[in-house]
Amino acid sequence: MESPIPTPDVRLDMSQCLRNLALSSPQQDAINALQTIYSYLDEGSQSPTTSLQRAEFRRSHFTRTLQVLVHNIQADWLHHLTAEQRSELWDGLFLCGPPEQALPVLMEGIGELRLGSNLDHLIGIMEKFLQRGRLSDLLWSYCLEGQSDSPQLRETLLARIVALPDLIANKLHHNNKPAFLPQQYYPQLAAGMLTALERTCKALKDGTSCSLVFVAQTLGKLCAQGHSGLVLATMSHRMSALTRTDMVWRRVCYKLLDNVPLRWIESVLTGLVQAVRGPDALGRIMGNLVLTNKTAQFVITHKLLLLQYKYETRVLRVILGYLAADKDRRPLLIKVLRSIAQAWANPSAVKHTPLEQQLYVSKILILCVSLLDDAELQELRSELLQCMLGGMHSHLDSNLDRVRRMGMVVGECLSSRMNVNGTKLTFQYEQDEETQEIVSLMTSMNMDESDLESEDGIIPPQEIPANSSTCSQPSQNESEMQPLKTDADSDLDSDDELTPYDMSADQEMNKVSPPRYLRDCLESLMCSEESERVELSLSVAEGLVRKNTFATKEISVQLTKVLLHMEDKYSIHGFLALRQAIMVALVVTDCIPVTEYLTTEFYSLDYSLRQRLDMLEVLAAAAQELSESTPGYTDTAVAPNLTSCSANNTAHWQQVVEKRIQAKTKRVSKGVTQPPLQAAANRYSPVAGYFFFPLLRNYDKPQVTFDLLGSDHLVLGRLIHTLGLFMYLAVNAPIAAQMGHALLDFVWALRYHADQMVRRGILFAVCSVFLAMPCQSLLVDLADQLFETRSWLADVAEGDLDADCRNLAVHCLVLMDKSLKKELQNPHARSIES
Amino acid sequence: MARPAPCPIYILRGAGGPINTLHFSCHGRDTPLLFSGSGKGAIHMWSLSIRRAERIVQGHSGSSVIWVNTVSSTDTLISQGRDMRVCLWDLGQGRSQLVDSLSTGSVGFCQCSMLETGSRTCLLAFAGQQTEEINIVELPSKTPVCTLVPDEKLGMVMCVKMWQPHSGGPVLLAGYEDGSLLLWDITQKSKLSQTKAHHEPVMCLTFDPEVQRGISGSSEKQLSSWILDRQNNLQLQDPVTLTNPGVSQLCIRGDGKLLASAGWDHRVRIFGWKHLRPLAVLQYHSDMVPSVAFSDHEDPRQRLLAAGSKDQRISLWSIYNEGPDTL
């Protein structure tokens, strides 16, 4: 068999075999041909072929052979083979030959064949191919030697490997095999990559040089196509465990990441920082990649931190901890801190970036500061101080409660870390999850050590004592309980024989008897110096106002004036609520004069913002109450929310807006399912105009102390919201059409206001216009505005910074479409129009 | 379901002025007596069997009587008035005669405290002329025993209580204007212990030598309870919270089961003394109650509670007298 020139021999041999296979020759010939081909793959010692011949075959004939086989898959001889012969000779060729050639042919075959037994056959081979770890062999073969194939071929192969689940699923549709599902395939591929890396390590230790370019490309492409979660979850654990002790592994991991093409490095890194458990693991895997690779540096220090804001705090800890862990990387941490501090303090960022991003930046800032050591802190002190002061200013300026609170918390944390002359800032704010999270970032930095332990599957040592302590706790409790119990027992003999009398009559005493007439109330509110008299008058006045309408009408405006100017001199419990309740009762009882008074005063000189807000709140609550007189019409669940006087306007606001719109949207869709209503007069609809129009009159005339369109946008937002409420409550009132028209005109000029609160108010108002205005007048009166409003709403729904604004805009659009559709489908209305 | 709130068994009217102080004298007499001192300077001697004022003593030249007591061995009545005098009256055989008087020099409201030391002698402690000064004299000889003045400024003496511990000489507990309580050893003339029980002036205090425990009230909403440990240190315990602020007198029943508090809110509150559990709220009066007292009847079933109010009435109550031990 030995021949000096094997090349023509192999070629001849092969062409003979292939001819036998391609022409439907007798079965025995085909079998012989297959056996001959197989002998070229056989690496055993008693193989009839030489290694040169085998190499030749592998290099230039294997792909062709497989292509011929797949091409003739429906040949008669193949079906006459026994199952054993078939799996040994036919399938074996695919599974034993060079995997980088077998895979493309298999995929091509699968792509070309129709559903049927032949396709099933190829799929079966594919399954085995995966099961036997041929993917790992494939990757390894590329590690080992610089494969000489063309870049295009590599690209194709890469694409096939990465997209294999998609390709097969496209072919098989519902008959897909579990092995090809992404959840199985990608971890398997990751395991294959790990095996290839392991082999690389071994080879490196033996002194062979390897190339990781192809594995890195695979990894990059996988991550870029969005499979980073599955792949890196498998890989990062193993890698972090192995790199703990093995320096070669560290080198290999670093090389692997370094070899990832630049266009994919971002997705690999983002996947990696999310997959690793702690900053140390990231440091071991990545090494100093951020220092050598500019793209990696940009991604880690800039893109993940400053441009995106979707990552959870754990990831931030990992990234910043990684930067802080090595002295070479620490300058980067300081650089990050500088840019983050700038971003945090930037007043325009506070105004124009979404809240979530501001929270994200705040967290990073706190994390960075907590990672600095004292020397670095000293160095950066003046910059940080500058940032803190500027940032505090712009945060506290904001209208949004959350932004202010964020500023306060961050300010507190920064000042306590910097320790300026031993003093630190303290603010009064309500604790919530957000603030607690930010504060916790200052302290708990050493908690990820235990994470690291558990990531290798080692049970952290604390676990066991913790368990035992929880076990021992009850026993401790019991031992504590014991003496208590005996103590209680000894009690029994003495006090328990004395049964208590009924003590329910033991109430707090009031020294002064409550006033019986409203005029007395007014007098004591005006000039009493006794706190108890004032308190009693406040608490009974609402009842008196509602009880005696005639007496109330005589002094209603005067009492309103007194109440409006009243201050909580004696820190009376529930002062604001009481005062508001009385004023609401006054408006309800003597509607027109009091409303006129309040709406005029709203635009007059020398009121505080609080008083102006009070006026709006009172009017809103009163309108709400007036409109409620029709039983069963208004949503009762909403009512208490509106009338309650709350200190935190924002929460109150959002709730009301949210509930209201949801409740109403449902109602529209439900249509006629509501039972017929009892008729009762709506007390609001005849007076709606008194509430509404005076407030629209003077908004653009700035006063010395009150500039609605300028700095006082808090009141503006509230005003628009209140107007929206009046509009909404005026549903079915004859005046609603005019009101809607006026309101839309009013908000049009303000629709791109810089403040979120104002924009929310505007959107709420627009919502209520669509809810309350009769459909036909919507079309007739507002036809020219509707189109513009629509495009504006679409714009807001898409591009507004504030999530609430976007939601509201979507609601608006839905409402608008609904009422328009209803109107256009209504034949009666169409006839009117025509 | 709790029992309905109790009612008074009898009302004594006609005192002609606000009742400042009450004192029972029922032990070892055929007719149980109740003494009351009014804001108009009259001391009424009420017979509890006929429920009428048996005798009225006009002393202290019309100034308010703030404290009355009797020396049990003799028929002597001691009264203290706002005219800065303490008067001793002989009540024997229908007499009501001023026997002796001494000047205290105190313009405050601090009630005296009396401790019987022998068959005929007793000690009397009262606030002195100086702000923080407490004088103790022996009666009837009127010999000064000692003067107790604290080192630091504590404000006026508000209330004092003297008792004889099981071992050692008599001790005196005083409450001061700044809310402090001081325990004095009378024979050593030295301070034993000090604690700050209240933020406001101490209005009243009482002490039970049997359980070494006491309680004090002020114008606040809280009663402060404290114990005296073996080293004679005052230790504060959990306070008791009241519905309305202000307590003018506290009184422990002789059997150590009940504590009564006279409140500024017109009500008398009854607590179990052992655990200070609220038991009853006695509501009758229409004005502040400055005084409350338990009677010292020999038969525990006849024991009464008396409350004297600024509305010029004295209410008598029979409460928790039917314990299982008496049935």
Image: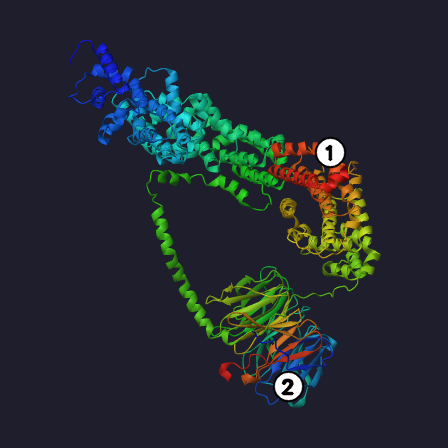
- Which residue is under mark 1? A785
- In percent of width and height, residue B235 lies at 51, 63
- Left or right: residue A685 versus residue B113 is right
Query: Residue B48, which numbered label?
Result: 2
Q: Front-most of A103 and A399?
A: A103
On the rendered image, what quadrant is the C terminus of chain A found in?
Answer: top right
* Mark 1 secondary-structure assignment: helix
Look at label 1 and name its amino acid. Answer: Gln
- In percent of width and height, residue A424 lies at 56, 40
Subunit under mark 1: A
* Mark 2 secondary-structure assignment: loop
Q: Front-most of A197 and B271?
A: A197
Subunit under mark 2: B
Look at label 2 and name its amino acid. Answer: Leu
User: In this rendering, is residue A492 above or below A108?
Assistant: below
User: In this rendering, is residue B221 above or below A38?
Assistant: below
